Amino acid sequence: MRVTHYTNVPPETVEQGAEGVLIREVITRADGAPSFSMRVFDLEPGGHTPQHDHPWEHQVFILEGRGTVWSESEGDIPLAPGDTVLVMPGERHQFRSAGEGVFRFICLIPNLEDRA
Amino acid sequence: MRVTHYTNVPPETVEQGAEGVLIREVITRADGAPSFSMRVFDLEPGGHTPQHDHPWEHQVFILEGRGTVWSESEGDIPLAPGDTVLVMPGERHQFRSAGEGVFRFICLIPNLEDRA
């Protein structure tokens, strides 16, 4: 068993099309997680993840702040704490901050062999 | 893409060794989730999950309240909002409420064929 507060994991900056995004890789393969990984994202005001797609899904739970998630099929959907998002494999998507404080969410992904 | 507030999912009572536990199956196979599932647990004051083990892992993020997680190897570890827990496959464990309000956490599990 491994117990840790998510803030004990040092944040890293996300590059490659993102702006104002910090990521904490809270539970990963390196911790022995067999199937999937947990990350916590902090988006600054005005921050956004890349507009991209990939062959794996996201499961997201909004912790704090306001934002949106965009997908090609559905456009922008507003997000607030307690909202959850399932992004399907191959679905083009982008998360954007929409408030004046941090926009924070948990984002889980499968541990695929070919995931970057 | 599927966006929903976790409280839009009706809570169900957990039986079988649990007490004062409500579970919301927020993202599951039925929603098309390929690899893993997201549930939100509410433990009432005095509530607890069963003391059990199973061949799949848990990934937990504490949202609200106070509680503990017990494992055979490490005993009781206190939990507060922002704490994360990785319970390994086969590890005997139990979550307990330790506060006067609700003890709420997200708990994710893989979508194994043989999972109940």
Image (cartoon, coloured by chain):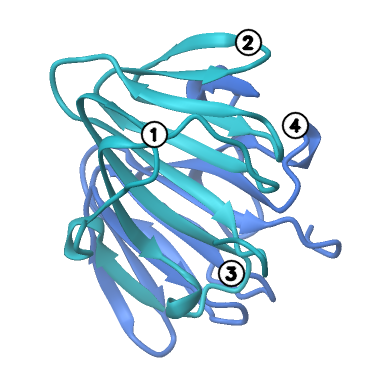
Chain colours: A blue, B cyan
Residue B58 image position (x, y, % from top left): 57, 42
Label 2 and label 4: CA atoms lie apart by 17 Å
Query: Label 2 marks which chain's residue?
Result: B
Decide: is B70 above or below A50: above
Query: Label 3 marks which chain's residue?
Result: A
Query: Which mark lies nearer to you, 3 or 2?
Result: 2
Q: Residue at x 62, y 28 (%)?
A: B92
Quadrant of the image occupied by residue B89: top right
Q: Residue at x 68, y 13 (%)?
A: B73
Label 4 and label 3: CA atoms lie apart by 21 Å
Residue located beneath label 2 in the image: B74
Q: Amino acid at mark 2?
A: Glu
Residue located beneath label 3 in the image: A57
Quadrant of the image occupied by residue A38: top right
Label 4 and label 1: CA atoms lie apart by 24 Å
Query: Label 1 marks which chain's residue?
Result: B
Residue placed farthest to the right in the image?
A: A113
Same chain for the residues under marks 4 and 1 in the image: no
Q: Residue at x 18, y 29 (%)?
A: B102
Label 3 and label 2: CA atoms lie apart by 33 Å
Question: How many C-alpha atoms fall within 10 Å of the one at disc 1: few (<14), some, or many (≥20)?
Answer: many
State whether residue A5 appears in this view.
yes
Residue A88 image position (x, y, % from top left): 53, 77
B48 displayed left or right of B33: left
Query: Which mark lies nearer to you, 4 or 1?
Result: 1
Question: How many C-alpha atoms fall within 10 Å of the one at disc 4: few (<14), some, or many (≥20)?
Answer: few
Query: Which mark lies nearer to you, 3 or 1?
Result: 1
Query: Which mark lies nearer to you, 1 or 2?
Result: 1
